[in-house]
Amino acid sequence: MAITSANQLELLQTAEAVAREKMIDPNLVVEAMEESLSRAAKSRYGSEMDIRVTIDRKTGRAAFTRVRTVVEDELLENYQSEFTVQQAKQYMADPKVGDEFIEEVPPVDMGRIAAQSAKQVILQKVREAERDRQFEEFKDRAGTIINGQVKREEYGNVIVDVGRGEAILRRNEKIGREAYRPGDRIRCYIKDVRREVRGPQIFLSRTDPQFMAELFKMEVPEIYDNIIEIKAVARDPGSRAKIAVISYDSSIDPVGACVGMRGSRVQAVVNELQGEKIDIIPWNEDIPTFLVNALQPAEVSKVVLDEEAERIVVVVPDEQLSLAIGRRGQNVRLASQLTGLDIDIMTEEEESKRRQKEFEERTQLFMDTLDLDEFFAQLLVSEGFTNLEEVAYVDLEELLVIDGVDADTAAELQTRAKEQLEELARKALERAREMGVEDSLLEFEGLTPQMFEALAEDGIKSLEDFATCADWELAGGWTTVDGQRHKDDGLLEKFDVSLDEAQTLVMTARVMLGWVDPTEVEAEAEDEEEDILDDDADDSSEDEA
């Protein structure tokens, strides 16, 4: 077809119709037409020519122009689209490098192949514009709930029509054995929106914990109005869930508000989640109290919290053990997800046996090292003494409160403890030397002979070896792999060396070796101290507010 013989206004009408149908900017369609006509013209005049086409947005007239750019003599490569300053003087009054000479060329007749190619270009551009529009529309909706209609199912994945695009509900994001037929209405949580080569991908979920949180936000006006806040959610999709809530209005009960009159609000969420049982728990800043609430309906006798290890031991009555653990460990697993802590559950009988074992081990320690009889050793343990260091360096007054211990006895106990510690240190130092620990490490302050021995057993025998250690290698720590927390044992962990202390020791060794500039270490320490002070100031200002 010839562009000159076509109804010029028809181009604009077509562009507007396509833009309206695909809900994109008409200018994008016109630009696609210009590019397609430009390609057709290049196939007619030659691909090396710089042929450009502009369509008048009012009349629809297509203007074909040839552009030639002025370049320096040595950079001239394409004679069809470039020329030198000297050559340009034939066409331009005062040509300079970078100037463009534009001349109009006759329109081309588009043959069948050229027309088909132009159509493909327009369709491609329209598809790209449609994908961009779809991504821009949905990218900010991630984290919200959307209603859609099932279109089809592919290998267990459900394709959902969400109005201006398609989304996918993967097989592992469905609750239990949910089955859908084409045409079914479905409510899902938009988990992620990604821009991919084949267009934006909208990933839906019905198993994500935040899906339940968003459902409660829809059912409970107090949550929507931020009077009640959902602090944590844990789910075993299709079976059971726990949700922790807090009220910022003392007159409103957060649990009661979420349950609703006769359970109407929570029942609406349960019905959407295929009968999933939901425990609504009052959130508390005090972790042990919150954990006791989270383990409902089981009763808890005692909670022992290890904040550094982020672990917690819960003691329950013997008859409550199965209830606290739940079927297949479900109750304790959800409570662990809700609190973010590793939870060990033991019965009162097991806890009693553990305490008895510790008591016996400490009693035997004092009997063996301090040459005491069983009764006297038990007295020390009962008063809270756990090791020789505590006996040797505690204030003498603390020993005198023990029945039957006078000043002479207390002094004798401390003397024996100190002598025993010195003997243990001497033997540890000998073993460390035998294992090849160098003087450079033995002279390093901050480490004990027992620490030298422990380091040597792991092959750390010089100051250089010690300086290459990471702080967590010495103090130990926790790592999370695939959602599971794993304990990393530290070489000096049994000596109660904290992560900060380990970091200080390692940095001191590096400074001594000249690996690190001490002024940089001091500057970093000052920056950290300033950050801590700033945080404290922010916290205090928030409290005052």
Image (cartoon, rainbow, N blue to C red):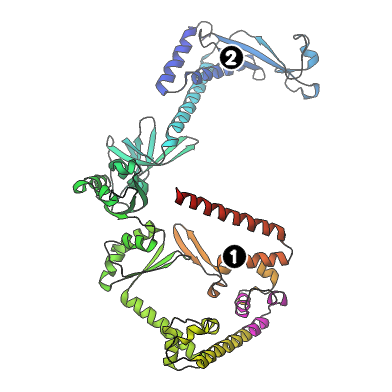
Task: Name the residue tied to disc 2.
Answer: 53
Q: Nearer the viewer, residue 29 or 424?
A: 424
Q: Quadrant of residue 48?
A: top right
Residues drawn in magenta = 428-455
- Residue that appears at 45% across and 65% down: 307
Q: What is the x, y in percent for residue 431?
A: 64, 84
Task: Name the residue tied to disc 1.
Answer: 471
Count up the numbered dots.
2
Circle 2: element type:
strand
Q: What is the x, y in percent for residue 474?
A: 58, 69
Amino acid type at circle 1 is: Asp
Left or right for 219, reference 29: left
- Residue that appears at 33% across and 51% down: 245
Q: Nearer the viewer, residue 535 or 365?
A: 535
Q: What is the x, y in percent for residue 358?
A: 42, 81
The answer to whether any part of residue 67 appears in the image is yes
Left or right for 256, reference 50: left
Residue 413 higher or lower than 43, as above or below: below
Q: What is the x, y in percent for residue 185?
A: 28, 36
Q: Nearer the viewer, residue 350 or 231?
A: 231
Residue 202 higher or lower than 423, as above or below: above
- Residue that appears at 78% across and 17% down: 84
